[in-house]
């Protein structure tokens, strides 16, 4: 049961982490889509096109040129590019990354999308912190740490009670079998009216007791006849 509970807890932990990350990725796609769609419009580069979608405390964005320079950025990440030039060269399509970002305390999930600004290609990078995901996973881990032993205790007590109830008829048969003695050769075990394995076991033991009784009776008859023959004088 401990193994089953541990496996279930591990599955829930991994599954919840994957679902939370999937939700973050969907939000990042939405943020990036708004900014990339606005790039074709005339005017300043629209880094704030998705400002209603982006929480400045938990999400941020940059527009980088091919060399990795910052064209425009939200205030939280205005100082340093979120992607180094080596990473920029490897981006040929929408790419998800998980990394530390300067100016952001928690690890961040990033989505880099190549786009075409008027006059030059750029890369739109949007990101979101993974702090809420880590907190949710931490709460789940704490819940499993406290709830797992409680569930294991309850299941063990229930299993002990069920096993005791299942073995009680076996103990009754054992006590009855121990009480049978040579003075009661015709005594038999009570057969439970269940039709299950215990009933068949009792029938088998009763059949065995019957065979033993017959063998004992034959032995007694042989001894009686032998004693009679030994007491009877042989004719002269």
Image: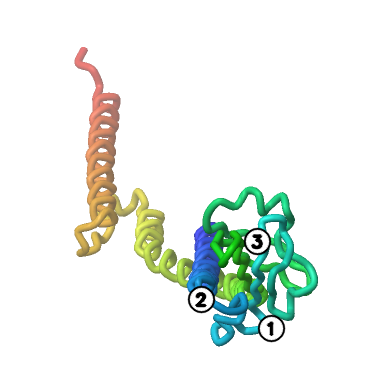
- Mark 1 or 3, nearer chain start: 1
Label disc, if present, on residue 41 of the rendered structure: 2
Q: Using a 10 Å C-alpha cutoff, classify the residue at mark 2 as few (fewer than 14 neighbours), some (14 to 19) or many (20 or more).
A: few
How far apart marks 1 and 3 lie (CA) works out to: 18 Å
- Mark 3 or 2, nearer chain start: 2
Q: Indicate whether 57 appears above or below 159.
A: below
Residue 152: percent from left, percent from top: 55, 69
| Residue closer to the observer: 116 or 162 | 116
- Mark 1 or 2, nearer chain start: 2
How far apart marks 3 and 2 lie (CA) works out to: 30 Å
Please say if the residues under marks 3 and 2 sit with CB atoms less than 8 Å apart.
no
Name the side, left or right, on which 203 lies relative to 120. Answer: left
Callout 1 secondary element = loop
Residue 95: percent from left, percent from top: 56, 57
Q: Residue at x 28, y 48 (%)?
A: 205
Q: Indicate whether 85 appears above or below 17.
A: above
| Residue closer to the observer: 2 or 105 | 105
Please say whether residue 33 is visible from this viewpoint: no
Q: Which residue is mark 3?
A: 98
Q: Which residue is mark 1?
A: 57
């Amino acid at each position: 049961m401990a193994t089953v509970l541990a496996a279930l807890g591990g599955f829930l932990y991994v599954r919840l982490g994957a679902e939370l990350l999937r939700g973050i990725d969907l939000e990042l796609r939405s943020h990036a889509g708004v900014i990339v769609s606005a790039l074709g419009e005339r005017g300043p580069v629209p880094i704030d096109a998705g400002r209603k979608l982006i929480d400045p405390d938990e999400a941020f964005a940059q527009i980088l040129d091919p060399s990795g320079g910052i064209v425009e950025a939200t205030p939280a990440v205005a100082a340093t590019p979120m992607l180094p030039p080596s990473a920029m060269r490897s981006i040929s399509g929408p790419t998800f990354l998980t990394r530390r970002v300067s100016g952001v305390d928690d690890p961040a999930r990033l989505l880099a999308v190549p786009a075409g600004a008027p006059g030059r290609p750029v890369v739109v990078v949007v990101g979101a912190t993974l702090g809420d995901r880590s907190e949710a996973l931490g709460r789940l881990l704490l819940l499993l740490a406290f709830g797992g032993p409680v569930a294991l205790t309850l299941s063990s007590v229930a299993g002990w009670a069920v096993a005791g109830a299942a073995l009680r008829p076996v103990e009754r048969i054992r006590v009855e079998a121990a009480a049978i003695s040579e003075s009661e050769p015709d005594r038999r075990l009570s057969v439970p009216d269940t039709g299950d394995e215990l009933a068949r076991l009792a029938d088998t033991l009763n059949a065995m007791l019957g065979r033993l009784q017959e063998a004992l009776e034959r032995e007694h008859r042989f001894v009686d006849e032998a004693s009679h023959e030994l007491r009877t004088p042989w004719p002269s």
